[in-house]
């Protein structure tokens, strides 16, 4: 949440200068009317004199600025207001309202101050006094800002600026720009906040207003604090403190000391932070500055917690919460509740932690405080993690980082250092969420989350999976997460709405009988709504705690006995390996034509998931050496049956991969001497393909090629696709005269770019081509079939959900090659249910064998690999698919293609220049493609 407190109201002699001008003008108008009227002594004149006397006494009391004198000033202003209303003196009435509003704000009665300013505004508009209207709008905004009505404050500041600029009120403009920046800061729009603070600072320096310049230096420091630029924040704070001491501004000195303390806290120096907080509290208590005392106490409690003093922290933040509620500072209340949630978690009281954090989240959502909302959602993730409620923690974590992504977009125009600092300061929630997803085996989602931390240049030149940069990306919610999230928002918004109405009524000094009835009704509604909200939270935890379905793999193992005969008929040294990952162990069952052998390796599912994730990260960085991790995983996955495979003289390994193991390119595992691709043909098979394993392949005589080479939206162009398809398919000269010089190995039809549409795809597939090759972008969103899709040539999308609902879309296809990114990837959704990848779905839709990819692939190397694959398939009587793929991969590994990675575009990925001097030996280039199904 925002790290500091921007003063929402300051002493009249500085920030409320526009109001002093307003009062002078109003009194001059009133005096002018009296002078020209020459009215004789009368009861009316007596009222005027009594009103002026009361008003002057109120002014003297307010200028003394002590809590007692301010309280005594209120009835004086109220008396003057009543008398001027009775006498019909509208100008003086407006002056009394303005002074009363200021005094109420000093007394922290902001709700009533809003009512008073709105009355003054109505009088000014009726009289046509536009210049003075700007000043009242400014003061109305400050009251709304304190009450947490940030968007209303923004609107009033914008309207005030128009009037102040029209009348050349430079000082008023500077003040309003400063508060406009404060309102932007509260809503997480830091770029706009800094811009307004800097413009305000320039004006006040021009006017040589040292005191207000100090305020703006402090507020700039606070904005940099929010961005994670703590060193720069401290520079601004030190400059501001020097100004405050020079002009003897004790109020703002205390506030800035507390803000500087928070910067030290974020820098990991809680002792230094506490030193500053203690100094701030001395000043705040000496001056009776309760709002700032409450804010400083909240920060002090967090610093005490960082020192391991949780009990002290609990008492400190408890005092802060009581003060915030007394002051009706809803934003400050939310911050105190968030801090208490952290403290209760540290004390092991996770029920209490959830209660405090849920209340804090409701307030942050009500106020539109996006940074505070993101921070509280992160704390909810941490508390649920501590409770062992992993899936609920993921639910909160996704919403937290999606809110941070929104805030990142809001600062995209700031200098690079500020953007990087913000990411660095907020990386904790991203990494925690990724860790939770990895532990659950949801590696695709984890990778997407960590990719968000990378700068946009990386996405432009290294990774553009779905054409999205780091800022535009969001963590996709599973259907279950989205549905529960919608219910959560509806219920929390209901609580927030009732609470807002209740707060407005309780802030009034006097209630009408009707308002009293409304308040009683709202209190009952609020009690019911809060009960419903907490009941829903209990249900939420219960729903996410439901166990994931299991047992499918055990059933497959029981049914696998019949596979022995299939293996015997397949020949080619074929064996089958069934893998099972349990909570504490990895099991592999090896089937040969003659035997069944079961082995195991002791490793927890969480540790295995982490190893696989690290391996995949290394594989997708061509500058890295993946072999150490490849050897670690080899020892786990293959090591238990290594000798058994040698004894069985195995040549073709048919893998039935369990859960997260489906993310592993087995061909890239390393035994210390070489990669698996150098020893074995590796194939993946599923229950959907088992029945087709013995089918003899149809002749590779005719095929269908479909491709996208042009850019669409955020998807980059793929210039190698036309060459890739021409190297595979040769079209009939009559049908495609321009393609008569093509050297393709298969006769067929090519649908490129605009010719590749949903209708043309379906029409061509009805002709039952034995070979179908698709070269395009594929966007895979783990857990979401609707938002995972193939990009078609006309820019439209063919989703996994649509493919799933089709009827035998790929019937008659012997080999479907998906030359795009992530087409082999599947993954568990938030409900633990498996979402199948494109490759497996294509098999369910009739394709007997599918070549698909496990990560975004490079355009140039993919063209070469596919060209070699089909060339080998077309030689003589035709090489088996598994052997052709293995040899094509070896050609890249050993550099026998004679090519270099000059063209770096990826099917959803763009390769950076740092790879230009390297060949395609790294597994990144050749390992993503796997063969699923009939390998003959």
Image: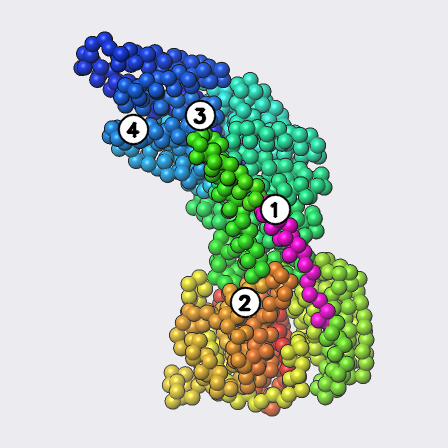
**For the residues marked 4 and 1, what is the alpha-carbon distance in whole angstroms?**
46 Å
User: How far is disc 3 from disc 4 in space, using C-alphas?
Assistant: 20 Å
At mark 2, the secondary structure is loop
Q: Which mark is residue 123?
A: 4
Expressed as whole percent of the image width and height from the top left, the position of residue 471 reads 49, 52
Horizontal arrangement in the rendering, residue 840 relative to residue 574 (left or right): left
Q: Which residue position is annotated with label 2?
A: 785
Camera-nearest residue between 903 and 562: 562
Residue placed most toward the observer, 602 or 118:
118
Q: First in sequence: mark 1 or mark 3? A: 3
Residue drawn at the location 57% of the way across and 55% of the way down: 484
Report the side of 436 relative to 519 (left or right). Answer: right
Q: Earlier in the sequence, mark 1 or mark 2?
A: 1
Q: Residues within 10 Å of mark 3 (few under 14, many from 20)?
A: many
Looking at the image, is mark 3 or mark 2 nearer the viewer?
3
Q: Secondary structure at mark 1?
A: helix
Label 2 crowd (10 A; few <14 / some 14-19 / many >=20): many
At x 58% / y 74%, what residue is drawn? 841
**On the image, numbered disc 1 is attached to which residue?**
534
Determine the residue positioned at 38% across, 27% down. 116
* Extent of the magenta region: 531-553
Provide the residue designation for mark 3: 105
């Amino acid at each position: 949440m925002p790290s500091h407190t921007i003063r929402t109201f300051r002493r009249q002699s500085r920030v409320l200068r526009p109001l002093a001008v307003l009062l002078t003008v109003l009194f001059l108008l009133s005096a002018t009317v009296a002078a020209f009227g020459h009215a004789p002594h009368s009861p009316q004149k007596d009222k005027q004199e009594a009103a002026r006397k009361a008003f002057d006494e109120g002014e003297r009391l307010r200028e003394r600025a002590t809590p007692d004198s301010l309280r005594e000033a209120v009835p004086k202003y109220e008396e003057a207001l009543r008398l001027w209303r009775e006498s019909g003196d509208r100008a003086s009435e407006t002056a009394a309202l303005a002074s009363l509003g200021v005094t109420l704000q000093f007394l922290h009665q902001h709700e009533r101050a809003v009512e008073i300013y709105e009355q003054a505004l109505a009088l000014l508009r009726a009289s046509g006094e536009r210049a003075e209207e700007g000043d009242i709008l400014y003061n109305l905004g400050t009251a709304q800002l304190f009450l947490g009505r940030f968007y209303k404050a923004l609107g009033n500041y914008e309207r005030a600026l128009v009037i102040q600029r029209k009348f050349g009120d430079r000082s008023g403009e500077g003040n309003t720009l400063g508060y406009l920046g404060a309102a932007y800061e509260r809503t997480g729009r830091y770029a706009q906040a800094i811009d307004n603070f800097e413009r305000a600072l320039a004006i006040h320096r021009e006017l040589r207003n040292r005191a207000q310049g100090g305020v703006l230096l402090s507020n700039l420091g606070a904005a940099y604090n929010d961005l994670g630029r703590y060193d720069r924040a401290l520079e601004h704070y030190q400059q501001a403190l020097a100004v405050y001491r020079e002009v003897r501004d004790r109020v703002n000195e205390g506030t800035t000391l507390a803000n500087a303390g928070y910067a030290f806290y974020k820098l990991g120096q809680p002792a230094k932070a506490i030193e500053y907080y203690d100094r701030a509290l001395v000043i705040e208590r000496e001056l009776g500055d309760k709002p700032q005392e409450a804010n400083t106490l909240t920060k002090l409690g967090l610093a005490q917690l960082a020192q391991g003093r949780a009990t002290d922290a609990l008492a400190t933040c408890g005092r802060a919460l009581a003060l915030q509620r007394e002051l009706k500072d809803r934003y400050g209340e939310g911050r105190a509740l968030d801090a208490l949630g952290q403290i209760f978690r540290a004390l092991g009281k996770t029920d209490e932690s959830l209660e405090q954090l849920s209340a804090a989240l409701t307030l942050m959502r009500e106020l539109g405080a996006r940074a505070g909302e993101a921070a509280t959602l992160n704390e909810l993730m941490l508390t649920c993690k501590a409770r062992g409620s992993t899936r609920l923690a993921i639910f909160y974590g996704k919403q937290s980082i999606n809110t941070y992504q929104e805030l990142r977009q809001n600062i995209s125009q700031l200098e690079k250092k500020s953007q990087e600092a913000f990411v660095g300061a907020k990386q904790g929630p991203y990494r925690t969420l990724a860790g939770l997803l990895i532990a659950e085996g949801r590696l695709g989602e984890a990778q997407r989350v960590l990719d968000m931390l990378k700068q946009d240049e990386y996405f432009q030149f290294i990774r553009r999976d779905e054409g999205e940069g780091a800022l535009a990306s969001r963590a996709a919610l599973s259907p279950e997460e989205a549905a529960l999230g919608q219910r959560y928002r509806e219920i929390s918004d209901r609580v927030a709405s009732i609470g807002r109405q209740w707060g407005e009524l309780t802030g009034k000094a006097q209630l009408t009988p009707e308002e009293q009835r409304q308040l009683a009704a709202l209190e009952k509604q609020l009690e019911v709504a809060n009960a419903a909200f907490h009941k829903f939270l209990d249900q939420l935890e219960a729903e996410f705690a439901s166990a994931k379905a299991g047992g499918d793999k055990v059933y497959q193992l029981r049914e696998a006995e019949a596979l022995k005969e299939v293996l015997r008929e397949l020949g080619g040294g074929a064996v089958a390996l069934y893998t099972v990952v349990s909570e504490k162990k990895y099991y592999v069952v090896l089937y040969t034509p003659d035997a069944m052998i079961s082995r195991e390796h002791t490793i927890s599912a969480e540790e295995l998931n982490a190893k696989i994730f690290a391996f995949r990260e290394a594989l997708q960085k061509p500058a890295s050496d993946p072999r150490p991790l490849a050897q670690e995983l080899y020892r786990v996955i293959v090591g238990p049956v290594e000798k058994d495979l040698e004894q069985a003289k195995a040549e073709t390994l048919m893998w039935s991969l369990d859960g997260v193991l489906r993310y592993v390119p087995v061909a890239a595992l390393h035994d210390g001497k070489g990669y698996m691709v150098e020893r074995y043909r590796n194939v993946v098979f599923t229950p959907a393909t088992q029945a087709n394993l013995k089918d003899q392949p149809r002749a590779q005589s005719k095929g269908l090629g479909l491709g996208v080479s042009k850019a669409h939206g955020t998807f980059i162009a793929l210039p190698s696709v036309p060459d890739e398809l021409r190297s595979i398919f040769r079209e009939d000269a009559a049908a495609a005269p321009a393609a008569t010089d093509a050297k393709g190995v298969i006769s067929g039809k090519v649908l490129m770019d605009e010719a590749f549409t949903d209708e043309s795809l379906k029409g061509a597939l009805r002709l039952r081509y034995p070979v179908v090759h698709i070269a395009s972008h594929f966007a895979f969103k783990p857990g979401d079939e609707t938002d995972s899709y193939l990009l078609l040539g006309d820019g439209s999308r063919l989703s996994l959900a649509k493919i799933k609902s089709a009827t035998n879309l790929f019937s008659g296809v012997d080999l479907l090659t998906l030359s795009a990114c992530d087409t082999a990837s599947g993954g568990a959704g938030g409900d633990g249910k498996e979402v199948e990848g494109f490759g497996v779905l294509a098999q369910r839709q009739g394709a007997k064998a599918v070549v698909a990819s496990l990560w975004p692939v490079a355009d140039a190397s993919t063209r070469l690999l596919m060209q070699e694959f089909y060339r080998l398939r077309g030689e003589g009587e035709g090489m088996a698919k598994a052997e052709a793929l293995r040899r094509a991969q070896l050609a890249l590994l050993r550099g026998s293609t004679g090519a270099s990675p000059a063209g770096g575009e990826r099917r959803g990925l763009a390769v950076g220049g740092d790879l230009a001097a390297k060949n395609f030996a790294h597994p990144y280039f050749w390992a993503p493609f796997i063969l699923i199904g009939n390998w003959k």
